[in-house]
Structures are given as structure tokens and as C-alpha cells.
Image (cartoon, rainbow, N blue to C red):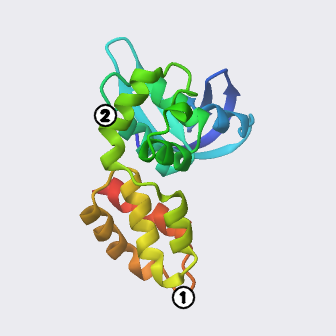
Amino acid sequence: MIAMIRGTVVSLGADHAVVDIGPLAVQVTCALPLLIRTSVGDRVHWWTALVVREDAWTLYGFDEISQKAMFELVQTVTGIGPRIALALLSAMSVEHLTSAIATENLTTLIKAPGLGRKGAQRLVLELKDKVVAVSGEAESASLEMGNWRQAVTAGLMSLGWSQREAEQACEAISEQAGPEPDVGALLKAALQTLDRA
């Protein structure tokens, strides 16, 4: 599996970027917000998910590992494939998507192109137990330096990891916390340890 790419953007399309990675140039399908922030000539470092179908191999790119994790989690829902998963991440951030699922906010979910009310209901039904509404919880926890573990654990659980896995990831990165922990950086580090597992 291709987990990450580094290279220079050589062209942009409506839904993709072509990235020169050395001896090859790879077409990477991206969410609209990422494409808007990207220009030809940019050096990029993107997390990727390879989706293999009978008629095509498609590489999807994300500038945050949490987006990749959510992209893969959403596709575990019956009837939701990569096109709708990418549409969800184009329509809202990981935090907003997590909150919408946790609070059963179907109105927000159906803003994603291609996702109807029934699909949104399935999304909530199948993922609600796997995500937690961390938009407020993680933010308030991050304000207290001693609670970085709580904030990172909540963030990981919102992306579908179990509490046990989240706590193990926190233990693995505990030495990186320092006296003034950066919860965002620690969450990325924790995701990297889980991605390698």
C-alpha cells in the first residue's frame, strides 16, 4: 500500500493533482479544500490511501493523517465508497464530520454531494459508537496541560480507534509531550504510531 508521497506538483485538475515523485509522476485525487490550497510547483507531503477497483487504481491524498483515517473509516459504512467519503471531507472538516455523526445531525451530513438522507442515517447508525463529539471536549481538555492524554485519546476515539488503542498510542508518545504539550502535534504523532501498527 502507498501510505505517503513526497514530491512537486506539476499539474492540477478539477479533482486531482499530478505529483512528480522522482522517476514517476502520480495522479492523486484530493478533496476540494486541499486542491484550492495547492499550486503548481508546490512541494507536498501527503498521506495517501490507495483504492483498488476492477477498472481502476485510485490514489487519494490528504495533508492531515486524521483526514486519511476518517476517509477510511467512513468507507466501512454500507453503501459508502471513496467518492462519497471524499465528498464528506470536501464539505466539512474532520472535526465537524465527527460532531455531525456523534450528534446525529443529518442536515449537516446531507450537505455532502451524493449523500442522501438514508445514507446519512446509515452513517450515524454504523459510526456513532465509533466516534465521540470531541469538538468541545478535546478543546477544553487541551487547555489544561495535564490533560493532553485526555484530549489525544478523545481525538483518536473520534476517528474510530478503541480506548485501549488510544491509550497505548498516548503511552508511546508520552516522552514527546514536554512541559507545554502541543495537543495537535501529539495527536499527529499518536496517529503515526497507530498507522505503523
Tag nearer the camera, 2 or 1: 2
Q: Secondary structure at mark 1?
A: loop
> From the viewer's perspective, is 22 left or right of 155?
right
* Residue 173 screen position, x and y as percent: 39, 74
Q: Which mark is residue 76?
A: 2
Q: Is residue 27 visible?
A: no
Nearest the eye: 185 or 110? 110
Check the image and report above or below for 180 versus 189: below
Residue type marked 1: Pro
* Residue 182 screen position, x and y as percent: 56, 73
**According to the image, label 1 marks what residue?**
179
For this orientation, the residue located farthest to the bottom is 179
Q: Is residue 163 visible?
A: yes
Nearest the eye: 121 or 187? 121
* Residue 127 screen position, x and y as percent: 34, 41
Nearest the eye: 38 or 75? 75
* Residue 187 screen position, x and y as percent: 47, 64
Q: Residue at image x 38%, y 66%?
A: 153
Q: Residues within 10 Å of mark 2 (few under 14, many from 20)?
A: few
Q: Residue at image x 53%, y 27%?
A: 110
